[in-house]
Amino acid sequence: MDTVKTTFQTIVEKARHDGAKVEMLISGGESLSIGYSKKKLESFESTQSQMAGLRVILGASQGYAYTENLSEESLLRTYVEALNNAKTVQSGDAAAVELVKPQSVKVMEGLFKTETVAMDKKLEVARLLEEKCLDKDARITAVPYSGFSENVSFKRVLNSEGLDQEFKQSYYSGYAYPLAKEGESSKMGGEGFFARNFADINAEKVAHDGVDKAVSRLGAQKLPTGNYAVVISRDEFPMVLQMIYQYFSAKEVHEGKSLFQGKLGQKIASEKFELLDDPFETRGTAVRPFDDEGAASQKTVLFEKGVLKNFLSNLEYAKKMNLPHTAHARRSPASQQAIGPTNLVVAKGEQSLQELLSSHDKVVYLTEFSGGLHAGFKESTGDFSMPAEGFLYENGKKIAPVDQFVMSGNVLDLLREIEAMGNEYNKPGSSFICPDVLIKSLSFAGA
Amino acid sequence: MIVQPHILTKALDAALSTGADFADIFLEDTYSSQLSVLNSKPEQAIVGQLYGAGIRLFFGHEIVYVTTNDLSETGLVKAALNAAQSRGAGAASKSMPLLQVPFDTIHTYGEKPWEMNRDRKFRWLNTIDQVSRARNSAVTQVDAGLNEKFQRVQIANSRGLMAYDERAYTRIRMQTFVEHNGVKESASEDEGHMGTSEIYDNIDLKSLAEQSVDRAMMLTTAAYAPAGEMPVVIDNAFGGVIFHEACGHGLETTSVAKDASVFCGKLGQKIAHESVTAIDDGTIENGWGSLNMDDEGNRTKKTTLIENGVLKSYIVDEMGARQTGYDITGSGRRQSYKYAPASRMRNTFIAAGKDKFEDMIRDVDYGLYAKKMGGGSVNPGTGDYNFQVGEAYIIRNGRIEEPVKGACLIGRGIDTLGKITKVSDDLKLARGMCGSVSGSIPAAVGQPQILVSSLMVGGRAK
């Protein structure tokens, strides 16, 4: 038997003596990252990590502790800390928190590969990501961010009910963000990739697509302030999903923080908006056979024809709020239990991107949100003012790149104003799988 | 001391065994604690330990970096050999004998976080909860938390440097949710420093909680901010995030060495209005972004970045100095051993000027007073930045008038620097967390009130 399991059994014995239940989440992995700068190898990083997080349940109270030192002595000390933490917190509930019982989970093939790729080939990918940007267009002056990485990650959940699940996956990823300059105008564009097989990587294409993204926006003009129809590109619509991401959590609903509170079964989005949480979709990066407390994953319909169909739950909140248990426990060993989605898949529509761009006299094709959510979205109200860039289209024809504008509104209004979905998905590499989305009207503050 | 010097010497020699011309080891043992009160009850208690090492090798301008959680002699030597063999094929060299670098700490700490009575900590959080709920019956939820971190670091390098340091951080935060006439809003406040938690006995948590409630209430009735270009007065303290984003990141050699900053090659040139002097200071006693030594073992410094509008210095780490030839400023920083260090800001602020805040407001016919800034980001390559404004007011005919919400400021760093036409005499600093290539680190921002003659305000179109 492995030493972690032996130690965990000692902990289970102690917990039984203390009248407690216990769960251990271990996660970690290995990664190799390679970066080039000015056509020379710049960084070569090889990291390995492991962390164990203990959750101790005393009746309705839960305490947590974690460590990166997985020796027996350290894990036993961590258990005592988690137990003390469970004694510290107070739950308002009478009902005891339960742990997930041992259960079978879907076997997911092809996610962990042991293929051996020669180091020269990996270096070559990293080199091409930068070099092909610099060589493609004289207006590319530098590639501030580029790199290749090879990753293996694992997660294991054990608990005092006898559950012991483990999941391992491997993948390659890389990116190239070239900087283009022409006169006074400078733009950075970027493209990335995500691949389960090394043979699927096309570094040159990623670099060239990144260059196109940067160069095409040079000479951008300011957008006149006003209301416009907007197509949010399939690569940027994930930002909108990130805005509503937490609202599905039964825990957030229970704590009065979710804007979806009290809206289950109601039509709160456009009929065109259909959203599925799919933990088995291998294009997505959030694939998993079981959740972070070990419960078997399942698909969950979130929006159907604009109607909010489900909240996401873990065992505790399914019971507390009398909701279906959807197996969406989410935590890292260093955090307490929360609830979150896996891969979010937006249903595709019928129209091509060009058709969407031709659907109104004037359309803003939004291709970049310039800042993160922290710089423009307020979760408690749904209000956003997001700096963005893109292209102005008139009667289906590209007029000019536009920048330095802010798209603002409320995310619930945005969901209601969705007019059509495109018929193509974004590339793999995200846990959000989306088409281009046409929105009838949004406010743009520009020149 | 986390690991004995003779073991580190063996690991450094292993690191130098294939031709690296420099190697260093960063060891870390960090205690973290997060406590929170929600629904008026102790809701969360998590403690934890980070424990590992990062070994870095330089082959000229090339960096090899490996990490391990195994801090035994075997573990460290193995990791160092892996690093060396992954790239090098040159001749071995030996590291210099390790000599402990002694220094007096700039910072004073009280009771360690694991020693302090937990009830005392929860009393501060309960005060925040109770005061907030008593302030206004529209308060629907209060989320109050105390985050503490105690980081022990030991650094050794092949030039014979060995140093040990302790960094304590504490931060109390609160988020208040209100519902008034069917409108939901929230606001937040925080307080903290580099040091331990006994400071909260002497901090007016009551006023802080009341400010948070009042701001959330104010937002329930505020109209949306207007859109367009206008003069903007940015308040002191966290207002300094504008300089941090608009300029600071572009001065880090991480960007400069890659020709990925608009400030490349501008040393000695006028890059800002002459009223602007900006400083990055790692030596402020118990300052949020202060250090004794940086994460490469170099003593931290006070660095003048811009003096009367002229660019005086970049922010330089070991590799940055190698690549650009500029002097090291003691600015090599990282979130933890999991990240190789990079040149990063510490406590960065615009120095006090001579103008009076009242005069700045009086000079504006129509504009925005950005009182409380939110988060922001920058693209160092283009200098395009943006940030949110949590609390703002319309300035009309030289007077501060109605509050507005949802404002966002966007611009290009180098343009904005030229448009800072007034700088007040009232400098204040505030805490932030800064995210970049080497992770998320505590960094202070600051400034006196400033007047930007014209800035794009993103609000809602009429």
Image (spheres, rainbow, N blue to C red):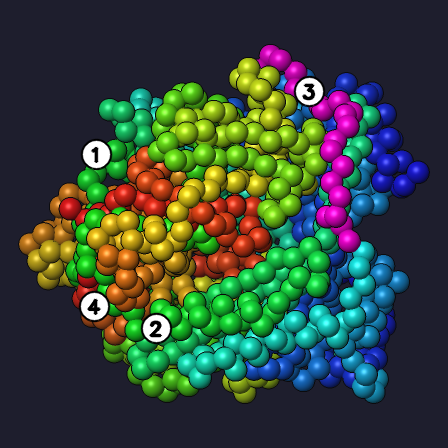
**Residue B9 vertical position relative to residue A98 in the rendered view, above or below:** below
User: Which residue appears at 63% of the width and 60% of the height?
Assistant: A173
Image coordinates for residue B429, horizontal then vertical, percent = 38, 58
Give the residue pinned by disc 4: B422
Q: Position of residue B71 (x, y in %)?
A: 81, 58
Q: Amino acid at mark 1?
A: Thr
Q: CA distance from mark 3 to mark 2?
A: 57 Å
Mark 3 to mark 1 CA distance (whole Å): 43 Å
Q: Of the residues shown, which amino acid type is indicated by label 3?
A: Glu
| Residue A385 versus residue A327 in the image, above or below | below
Reading the image, the residue beneath label 2 is A218
Question: Looking at the image, is mark 3 or mark 2 earlier in the sequence?
Answer: 3
Looking at the rendered image, the disc whose residue lies closer to the viewer, 4 or 2, is 2
Query: What element does badge 4 sit on?
Result: strand
Query: Which residue is denoted by mark 3 in the rendering?
Result: A98
Residue A140 position in % (x across, y down):
45, 79
